[in-house]
Image: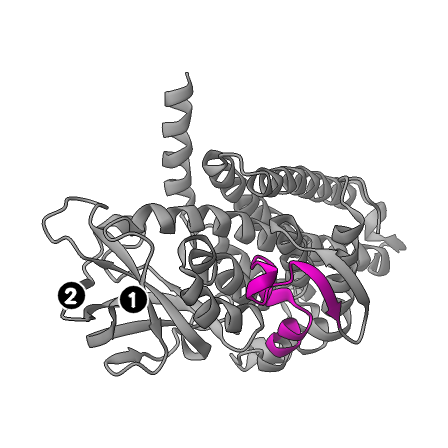
Amino acid sequence: MSNKYGLTEDQLSIQEMAKKFADEVVAETVTDLDARHAFPEEEVKQCAEMGFLGICAPEEYGGAGVGCLYNDFFFVEMRMDHLSNVLVIEQIARHSASLASIIDAHASLGSTPIAIAGTDEQKRKFLTPAAMGEGLCAFALTEPQSGSDAGQIRTKAVLEGDEWVINGSKAFITNSPYAATFLVAAKTDMEAKGSRGISVFIVPAGTPGLEVGKPEQKMSNRSSYSCPLTFTDVRIPKENLLGELNRGFPLFMKCVDDGRVAISAVAVGMAQGVLERAAKYSKERVTFGKPICENQAIAFKLAEMATEIDVARAMLYNTARMSDNGLPFSKEATMTKMFCSEMCVRVCDMGLQIMGGYGLCDEYQVERMYRDAKLLTIGEGTSEICRMVVGRFVLKEY
């Protein structure tokens, strides 16, 4: 693989490892799993074995850190970072947006709050098994009446003696049926206005009163399960408060920024997968005595697709590097998410158009990617919300 983006040797190694896994394992099962709406259990296990689920976690808590990753493909020593996480997600998304989204929800959203704000005891108890792939994490913020307006959540937590008692509901929570740990946002100061007075709690799966509903039957990401959650007098120890009391919203928003970078990687990877399939098809499909790639109309579409993907990838890698270097990147994360998600929809549309009627058939996989792409403009901040956020930054700057 070329290195036109200035990746380190470690990053090139993890990129190659992820590509080989995606091409040899993920590509073989993704169509069948999507058709059956089946969760990719075996693929998730292999991701855990390769260290992909602990990429963003410190080494001392079971993360990849500086250490050895061993699997059937490679034995290497490398240092992991957010850009490495992006590289893994991007390669997997070339074949499966569902599996890439599962990793995103676990590593970028679900376990990151613990890595950022957890006590040493919390990290050892909850982050270590998450990083080692012993159980997935789920990021429980969205509620039926508060998606884009996340600060208006109604789930409440009240301290009774040495326990927090949680009541409320959540919606569209990814990884729920397979999660070992839930990171739950709840209102703890009932008098506070807007997003103030929200705290974050660690709720282990199986806690009495926590009910995981049936997975939503979605158009997109059929192998990635999103479920409603119900909390009925759920009692957890008071030490399961994550971070500062009533300061949970800023913590979640920091994780949302990381999540927007990760979902942008899903978009870039998926778009790359569509380009590869459309280009291959255009060379093989012959009409009027010549391959359709020799028609200017097709060549122009391929050129537009490749250009948009390269621009999006450069934007994505730069934003990931900003995160790794500790720079403020909220505006850039939102801009990247907005551009990459909409780019992916455009590329999928052009790819399917190139493939014509065959593009609508599941054998050629682009129809699945076309369905999956739309989710990217909705999840982790709709395109409209992203524009509002970026607009506020612009008005502050100028």
Q: Secondary structure at mark 2?
A: strand
Which residue is label 2 attached to?
A: 159
Asked if residue 333 lies left or right of residue 388, the reply is: right
Q: List x then y, in percent, for residue 219.
A: 46, 67
Which residue type carries mark 2?
Leu
User: If the image is split into quadrants, where does the C terminus sit?
Assistant: top left
Residue at the disc numbered 1: 239
As drawn, which residue projects farthest toward the left?
A: 191
Q: Label 1 is placed on what type of residue?
A: Glu
Residue 367 location (% of width, % of height): 60, 64
Please provide the residue range marked out in magenta.
44-70
Residue 357 placement: quadrant: bottom right
* Residue at mark 2 to residue at mark 1: CA–CA distance: 11 Å
Vertical comparison of 6 with 37: above or below: above
Residue drawn at x 53%, y 81% is 38
Q: Nearer the viewer, residue 22 or 349?
A: 22
Of labels 2 and 1, the one closer to you: 1
The residue positioned 64% from the left and 48% from the top of the image is 83
Q: Kindly give the residue lying farthest to the front in the view shown.
A: 120
Quarter of the image for residue 395 reads top left
327 or 41: nearer the eye?
Answer: 327
Structural crowding at the residue carrying mark 2, measured as other residues with C-alpha within 10 Å and reported as few (<14), some (14–19) or many (≥20): some
Relative side of 69 to 340, left or right: right
* Residue at 26 percent of width and 56 percent of height: 199
